[in-house]
Amino acid sequence: MAKDGLPANGVICGEFPADRIPRKHHLALWRRVCAGECEVIPLSEAWLFRDDIKSCALCDLLLTRQAMSATRYERTSRHVERSGDAWIVLWYLRSGSLSAAFDDRTHVRLEPGSLCALDWSVPHVAVATDYELVTVAFPRSQVPAAELMGSRTPAVTWAQGSAQAEILGNALEHLLSQLPQLDRDAAAALAAGFTGLLGGLLLAEGELLRNRYAETSRADAMKQFVNEHLRDPSLGVQTLCERFHCSRATVYRLFESEGGVASYIQRQRLHACMRELTRIKSPPKGVLEQVASAWGFTNPHRFSRLFRAQFGLSPQEALRAQAPPGPKQPALRSEQDYWQYAEVLNGWIASRRRR
């Protein structure tokens, strides 16, 4: 076994048994696991593990199955600077819904049965309803398509029912079922095979192949301009045409993959509202309407409907979940094994970043 507690060639697993851990510790435990990688922001007043949390190190891969209450995750540029670009991460959503924005520009939405391969070097936010998710972290050096991702295409998604989702999802389910009984040789073979499968599917993606030749600077500049002027009520297609001296047809084409300019602006404004609501610890009266109005949503009923459609929960639920911090969490050297395992799992992640 390697010095970091991971097998050089094999499998090691651990778990948080949800029914054995006091609920008051669930959030603090998960935040400790994710420390250094992203912020964990609860979107439920009674946030908890909805099932056992299981993690396995399979040679160079790190697999985690998590089932939790609604959560917002935020990986900032500060996290990226600290943790580096060591990973390509695969999300496989088993239940719930997940909405994410990468580099404040690229939007994805996952429903049960869909998968997303993402570049961990790109800052992003992800908002999930009560959910079950399987994640697999791959060393970047083992995924050749990683050089085609980055900010140009930070995420590739495969919808439930697509051929890619069927192939990759079935392979992942098979891999998970085999983990408890794998010997060293079988573990190495499965890890290499699954990594090769993901790499092959990514290299077959037309969007990534076009990145070798595509010029994306104009679209990126437009999105940056939009992000800097989201509070402007007149922001729209005509604004971009005037600012970038181009036709409406050009703007429509550049935003076609985003569902159009209006859809892109609306999603960006909704994410801005979610960000503000999850940072208010003691909300004063009327703050919900103030936040919505500041980002251009003057009709409260329409705002609530759009917010729920985007994130799967109401703005009131997101706001109520932001209670003042509770009692100080137990010391790192707690005698409880689940606290010790939180440190082990965080150590696994850190050790993989250094490789």
Image (tube, helix red, strand yellow):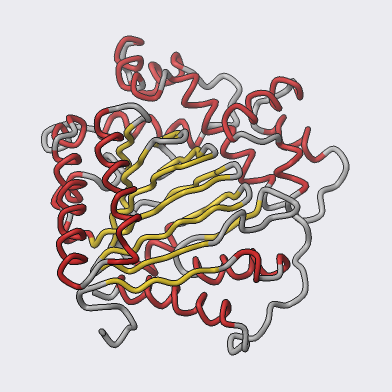
Above or below 270: residue 44: below
Question: At x 50% / y 46%, what residue is drawn?
Answer: 126
Q: Position of residue 295 (x, y in %)?
A: 64, 32
Q: Is residue 322 left or right of residue 13?
A: right
275 left or right of 154?
Answer: right
Q: Position of residue 183 (x, y in %)?
A: 22, 71
Quarter-of-image position of residue 130: top right
Query: Picture coordinates of residue 162 (x, y %)?
Result: 30, 27
Residue at 17 percent of width and 50 percent of height: 147
Q: Is residue 124 above or below residue 63?
A: above
Q: Is residue 341 above or below residue 168?
A: below
* Rendered location of residue 131, percent (x, y): 55, 45
Q: Residue at x 42, y 35 (%)?
A: 108
Q: Residue at x 68, y 53 (%)?
A: 279
Where residue 27 sits, quadrant-wise, is bottom right
Which of these two is toward me, 248 or 210? 210
Give the side of residue 288 with respect to residue 98, left or right: right
Q: Is residue 298 above or below residue 179?
A: above
Residue 260 found in image quarter: top left
Residue furthest toward the front?
181
Q: Nearer the viewer, residue 162 or 300?
A: 162
- 258 and 57: which is toward the camera: 57
Question: What is the total number of numbered labels drawn onto the structure image?
Answer: 0
Q: Quadrant of the N terminus?
A: bottom left
